[in-house]
Image (cartoon, coloured by chain):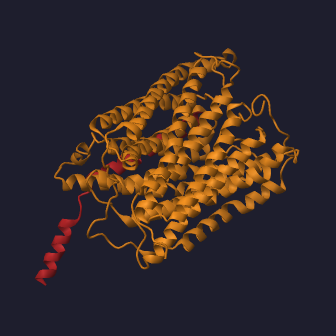
Chain colours: A orange, B red
Amino acid sequence: MIATKLGISKSDSKLTMAFIYVAFISLFIGGLMGLLQTLVRSGSLSLPWGITYYQVLTVHGVILGLVLTTFFIIGFQYALMAKTVGISKKQRLYAWLSFIVMLIGTVMAAVMVLLGKASVLYTFYAPLQAHPIFYFGLALVIIGSWIACFVNFRQLYVWKKTHKDEKSPLLAFMVVINMVLWFIATLGVAAAVIVQFIPWSLGYAETINVLVSRTLFWYFGHPLVYFWLLPAYMAWYAIIPKIIGGKIFSDSLARLSFVLFLLFSIPVGFHHQLTEPGIDPTWKFIQVVLTFMVIIPSLMTAFSMFAMFEITGRRKGFRGLFGWFKHLPWKDVRFFAPMVGMLAFIPAGTGGIINASHQLNNVIHNTMWVTGHFHLTVATTVLLTFFGISYWLIPHLTGRKLTKKINNLGLIQTVIWAVGMTIMSGSMHISGLLGAPRRSAFSEYGGTAQASDWIGYQIAQAVGGTILFIGILLMVYIFLQLTFFAPKGQEEFPIAEEEVNAQPTPLFLENWKLWIGITIGLILFAYTIPFIDIILHAPTGSEPFAWPIGNS
Amino acid sequence: MENAEKQKSEERVETPNLKGTLLSVLLLGVFIIVSWFGVFALFLSR
C-alpha cells in the first residue's frame, strides 16, 4: 500500500502556491483590463497603440473568468486533499504535470489574445474566429485540468482502500464532486474546441455549425458557474464553522446539497440560450425546470449557514432574535470576507432565478444586467470567499502569520470591494433593465435619445470599477505580504468538526455509481433529442468572421 | 418510565433555537419573490 501522510508538507505547499501565484498575477492583469473597459465605456478614455476594446474585454474575461478561477480552485483543492486524505509522491508528480500543462495552455491562449489574434471574448462564440493557437491553448488548459481531476479521484480512492467502512472526509468528498462535475462538463467544450473550432480555424473545415458550438459551450458554461461556486461552498460548510468557533451544521445536508449540484447544474445550458432560434421551446422549458431544481441545494445552503451561525451564537450566550448575528466575528477577515460574499449571493442568486425565467430573460437578455449579475456571483461571492481562504491558506503554506495589521488591511479591502461592487454592479443591473446592451465598445450609440439614459450609469460603473481596482491593488499588496514579508510562524488550517452527537451520515450519499449514473441519465434526457434536432435541421454553417473582432 | 421521560425532556432542551434562522430564510424568500415579480411586471409593461 502506498503510504500517504496527512497534512501539508513543504512539497505540497510549493504545489498549491504555484497555482496561487498564477491566480494572483491574473487578478492584477485582469483587474487592470476591467478598469480600462469601464473608462472606455464611460467615454473618458481612448485606448492607445491600436489596442481595441474587444481585445481588452477578452483578456479581462478569459484571465479572470477562466484562468484565475481554475488555477485558484485546483490549487486550493490539492491543499484540501493533501490535508484530508493525503497525497503520494507519484500523485504529486502528476499534480505538477497538471499545473505545467495548464500553464503552457494558458500562455499560448494569453499570447494570442494579447496580440489581438483572439478577440473572441471568453465565450469564443462562433462565427468569431481566433488564431488556431488560442484554441490549442484552451484544449491544453482543459487537458491539464483533467489530469488534476484524476489525481483527486485517485487520492480519494487510495484513502478509501485503507479506510473501508468509513465515510470519506467531507472536504475530500466535496472536491471529488466538484471534479466529477468539471470533468463531465468540460467534455462538451472539449468536443467543441477539438471537433469544431480547431479544424475550422486551421482551414480544414470551411464552415462551422454555430448552434452546435454554442450549445456545447453552454453545456459547459453553466456548470462552470458551479465549478466556481462549489469551492466557496466548501469553505462555507466546512471551514467557516471552525473560524467562528462552531461545528458543521449537518454533514449529510452538506453532502446532499453537493450531490444535487452535481445532478442539476449540467443539464440546464439552454437557459443561457432562451432567445436562441433553432432550439425546440419544449426542451428549453424542460431545461428551465431542471435549472429551477438547482434552487433547492442553494436554499439548503442558505438555511444551513444561518442555522450554523445561530447555533454557534446562542451557545456563546448571545440571546434575542438576532443577537447571534450581531456577535459574529466581524473583525476576523477570514470570516468577514466570505461573509460579505455570502450576503452578496442573496441578490446574485435572485438575479440567477430571474435570468433563467424565460419571460424575464427577454427583459434582460444581452443587457448590462447580465454583466452586473456575474460580477455579483463570481466577482463578489466567489472571489471574496477565495480572498477569505487566502488570508489563512497562504500564510499556512508559506510558514508565516496573518498579523493584526494584515487582518485589518483585509477588512478594509473587503469594504472597498463591497462598496465598489455595489456601485458598479448596481448600476449595471439598473442600466440593463433600461435596455443598455453589454459587450459593445460604444457609449453614445450615435447620439440616440435612449442611450442618453444609460450614460450616467456608465459613469457610475467607471467610478465603481476604479474603487474595485484600488481593492485589487490592496489585495495584491496583501498577497505579497502573506507570501514574502509577514513574520514567520504557524497559521491554522481550519477544518470544522461535526457535533459530537451528530446523526450518522447515510452511506448512500457516497454511492458514486448512483450519482454519476443519474447525472448522465439527466444529461442524456435533457440533451439527446434537442441535440439531434439541432444537427438534423441545421442551417448552412458559417464561414469565419475574423473582422472587425476576432483575428485581425 | 421516569428515566425515559427525563431523557425525552433532555432531548427537548437540546433542540436548538432556530427562530432567527426561520425569520432570515423567510426574509430571503420574500426578497426573491418581490424581485422576481418586479422584473415580471417590467416584462408585462413592455
The residue drawn where x is 70% and y is 16% is: A446
Please give the count of numbered marks on the rendered protein.
0
Image spot of residue A488 (x, y percent):
32, 43
Q: Is residue A169 left or right of residue A207?
A: left
Image spot of residue A270 (x, y percent):
66, 51
Residue extending farthest left? B2
Nearer-the-camera pick, A133 or A338: A133
Q: Quadrant of residue A531?
A: bottom right
Q: Is residue A350 left or right of residue A50?
A: left
Nearer-the-camera pick, B38 or A127: A127
The residue drawn where x is 25% and y is 54% is: A245
Q: Is residue A220 left or right of residue B7?
A: right
The residue drawn where x is 42% and y is 45% is: A385
Nearer-the-camera pick, A483 or A247: A483
Image spot of residue A413 (x, y percent):
38, 33
Q: Is residue A63 visible?
A: yes
Rendered view: A471 above or below A245: above
The residue drawn where x is 40% and y is 49% is: A397
Rendered view: B8 above or below B28: below
Q: Is residue A266 visible?
A: no
Q: Is residue A66 left or right of residue A342?
A: right
Q: Quadrant of residue A416?
A: top left
Residue extending farthest bottom? B1
Rendered view: A342 above or below A242: above
Nearer-the-camera pick, A292 or A344: A344
Image spot of residue A552 (x, y percent):
78, 29
